[in-house]
Image: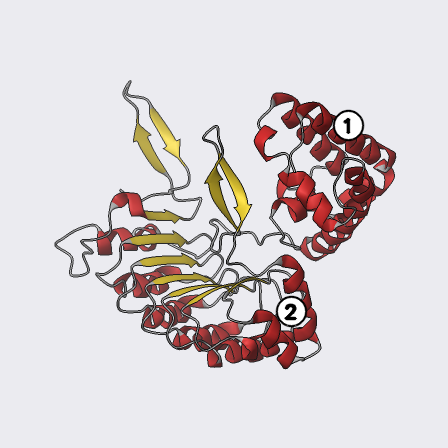
């Protein structure tokens, strides 16, 4: 169901007025979001629920179901007019009202709207320098613009909530029935905890594609070992985001050792594990011999030059695409450019002939400074390297 521009603007105006009437509550949420990551996440979830209840009766006046689905459908109805100047101005005004005058990180100020915009995701997306597991596909509109649509292969949000509940109570039979043969699941920030063990047991051993965001779930060594033990053996695609958990190096090692050698597309999110140089060695040994597409989010792991060198030397010659996140790893200049040395010079033993400059992207330490000379001779400072050339 679409919305004509005039009615769409009317709906936005009604939502804005509702936000103004609830300014005190929104201010309270905004203040709580400044009290640290844990408090911010809880406040964000409470605000998301608050906004959902506020929006349900409003969208119902415009022909949408008075439910979470109706609110989500209303957001989708704006797809064709999202770039209209009047629509964008109102969206910006809404977000300012949500911030309530507080200087809050943008990621948190719009968490209520992200619940809808993330196409069924019930929790805010985990922070990452790149989307390890995309939650949406894109199609061209009649005007040629790209519009987001829900991924058809990703487990639906309502089913995901049922799955989480089943895992938390240890109902493996129900979890297995809900999961079925699906291997694309977003469980990010669902408070799964020890339920990760039940989820692991529900995974189908016949999967060839597993894209699992299980970040921010307070998963420990036991959960990591359970996931490792249940890892399907014939995977071709494995994208696994375990960031913001408490796996320890032993948990990282368990996951790494379980990665099938048949994998051709590999994405691993291990940000914040502080695994040290030994973790680099563990990951190096886990890289499949025929992998073509490799993404590693290693933010905040204190790998040091030795850890990075271990990974760089393990890159196979089959590699065609490489994406790395290396911030907060105590890297020297030598360590930061280790990957460049290993892949960019045919005189080096590890020269990778299939990996082109446009398919090699990395982000690294902000204190590594490079300068670029412009055509007029001006030198400009490039603070953060994003691509090796």
In this rendering, position of residue 25 left or right of residue 102: right
**Residue under circle 1?**
13
**Front residue (pair 103, 16):** 16
Q: Residue at x 34, y 43 (%)?
A: 387
Can you give x and y, in whole percent of width and height, for residue 123 in the image? 65, 55
Whether residue 170 is situated above or below residue 38 in the rendered picture: below
In this rendering, position of residue 115 left or right of residue 264: right
Question: What is the quadrant of residue 37 in the picture?
Answer: bottom right
Q: Residue at x 38, y 67 (%)?
A: 280
Q: Is residue 108 visible?
A: no
**Front residue (pair 76, 53):** 76
Q: Secondary structure at mark 2?
A: helix
Whether residue 1 is situated above or below residue 13 in the rendered picture: below
Which numbered disc covers residue 163? Answer: 2
**Front residue (pair 52, 285):** 52
Whether residue 177 is situated above or below residue 145 in the rendered picture: below
Of the two numbered discs 1 and 2 on the same chain, state the one appearing first in sequence: 1
Can you give x and y, in whole percent of width and height, for residue 311 in the image? 32, 64
Number of residues whose C-alpha sits closer than 10 Å to that of mark 1, classed few (under 14), some (14–19) or many (20 or more): some
In this rendering, position of residue 154 left or right of residue 122: left
Q: Secondary structure at mark 1?
A: helix
Q: Is residue 292 visible?
A: yes
Can you give x and y, in whole percent of width and height, for residue 72 in the image? 68, 45
Residues at marks 1 and 2 touching, judged by CB atoms closer than 8 Å: no
**Front residue (pair 49, 172):** 172
Q: Residue at x 24, y 63 (%)?
A: 316
Q: Distance between the Cα atoms at labels 1 and 2?
A: 37 Å
């Amino acid at each position: 169901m679409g919305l004509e521009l005039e009615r769409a603007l009317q709906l936005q105006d009604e939502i804005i007025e509702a936000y103004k009437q609830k300014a005190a509550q929104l201010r309270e949420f905004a203040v709580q979001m400044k009290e640290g990551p844990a408090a911010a996440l809880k406040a964000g979830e409470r605000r998301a629920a608050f906004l959902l209840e506020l929006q349900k009766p409003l969208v119902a006046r415009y022909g949408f179901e008075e439910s979470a689905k109706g609110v989500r459908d209303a957001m989708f109805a704006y797809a064709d007019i999202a770039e209209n100047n009047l629509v964008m101005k109102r969206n910006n005004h809404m977000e300012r009202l949500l911030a309530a005058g507080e200087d809050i990180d943008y990621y948190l100020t719009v968490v209520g709207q992200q619940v809808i915009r993330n196409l069924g995701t019930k929790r805010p997306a985990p922070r990452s320098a790149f989307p390890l597991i995309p939650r949406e596909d894109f199609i061209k509109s009649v005007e040629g613009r790209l519009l987001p649509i829900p991924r058809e292969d990703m487990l639906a949000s309502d089913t995901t909530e049922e799955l989480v509940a089943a895992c938390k109570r240890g109902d493996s039979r129900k979890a297995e029935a809900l999961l079925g043969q699906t291997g694309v699941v977003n469980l990010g920030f669902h408070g799964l905890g020890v339920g990760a063990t039940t989820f692991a047991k529900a995974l189908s051993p016949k999967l060839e594609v597993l894209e699992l965001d299980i970040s921010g779930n307070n998963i420990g060594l036991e959960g990591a070992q359970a996931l490792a033990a249940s890892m399907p053996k014939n995977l071709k695609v494995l994208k696994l985001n375990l960031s913001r958990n408490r796996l320890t190096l032993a948990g990282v090692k368990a996951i790494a050792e379980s990665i099938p050698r048949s994998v051709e597309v590999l994405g691993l999110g291990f940000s914040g594990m502080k695994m040290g140089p030994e973790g680099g060695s563990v990951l190096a040994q886990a890289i499949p011999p025929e992998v073509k597409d490799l993404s590693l989010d290693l933010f905040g792991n204190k790998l040091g030059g030795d850890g990075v060198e271990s990974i760089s030397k393990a890159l196979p010659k089959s590699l065609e695409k490489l994406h790395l996140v290396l911030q907060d790893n105590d890297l020297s200049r030598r360590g930061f450019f280790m990957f460049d040395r290993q892949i960019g010079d045919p005189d080096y033993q590890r020269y990778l002939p299939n990996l082109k400059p446009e398919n090699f992207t990395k982000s690294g330490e902000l204190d590594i400074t490079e300068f670029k000379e412009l055509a007029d001779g001006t030198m400009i400072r490039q603070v953060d390297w994003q691509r090796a050339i």
